[in-house]
Amino acid sequence: MGGERPTLDQVRRELGDCQRCKLCSGRKNIVFGTGNPRAELVFVGEGPGEQEDLQGVPFVGAAGALLTKMIEAMGFGRDDVYICNVVKCRPPGNRNPEPDEIAACEPFLRAQLAAIQPRVVVALGKFAAQTLLRDSTPITRMRGQWRVYEGIQLMPTFHPAYLLRNPAEKRNAWADLQAVMKVFGKNPGSRT
């Protein structure tokens, strides 16, 4: 994709009808990303689930409903932010993405972030945080601590699917998101 800043359209065209890893054989749709191509805030998850694969849109299932609530609680709408995943095709049975699958998709994630150039990335869960940061620290220890990805502030936090299984952790995730809100001058509950 060269040395200059790509556009999201260029990144999507380069991805094409991707056959770069074995995930392509089971997918219905490539789930590239959605939202504002000039977003100052980007959320990165791990990979599409069943509903995402069917619709071709990230975070539309139960975890997506929770993510939407989280985004709205932060004073944003889904159209204000950009949402994507580390891998663009659904792993079978929603299993974790494997290292070769992550390696095949990672250049496209990095190109998406280069195209958008957000102020802040929120890494949702261990695969997003560990992939972007090249750091194997568990998400339970990494979350809530500002990191830097390619000059962009990055906040690791729990994945919404994890929060659905472990509701007691929602308080910690909210604290992480409040730190992100401060970067944008937003106060909890203000919706401005």
Image (cartoon, rainbow, N blue to C red):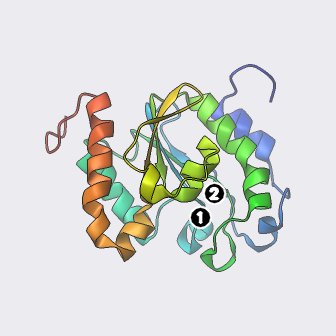
> Does residue 124 sit above or below 76 in this rendering?
below
Given residues 35 and 109, the one toward you in this image is 109
- Disc 1 or 2, which lies upstream in sequence? 2
Please name the amino acid that badge 2 sits on.
Val
Q: Is residue 41 visible?
A: yes
Horizontal relation, residue 41 to residue 191: left or right: right
Residue at 33% across, 38% down: 180
Q: Where residue 182 sits in the image (x, y, percent)?
A: 26, 32
Residue at 70% across, 27% down: 6
Tell me the number on the disc at residue 31: 2
Q: Where residue 149 sits in the image (x, y, percent)?
A: 56, 33
Please name the amino acid that badge 1 sits on.
Pro
Residue 3 occupies which quadrant of the picture?
top right
> Does residue 117 sit above or below 80 in this rendering?
above
- Marks 1 and 2: which is nearer the front? 1
Given residues 75 and 144, the one toward you in this image is 144
User: Are the two marked residues, 1 and 2, in contact with CB atoms closer than 8 angstroms?
Assistant: yes
- Residue on which disc 1 sits: 48
Horizontal relation, residue 115 to residue 144: left or right: right
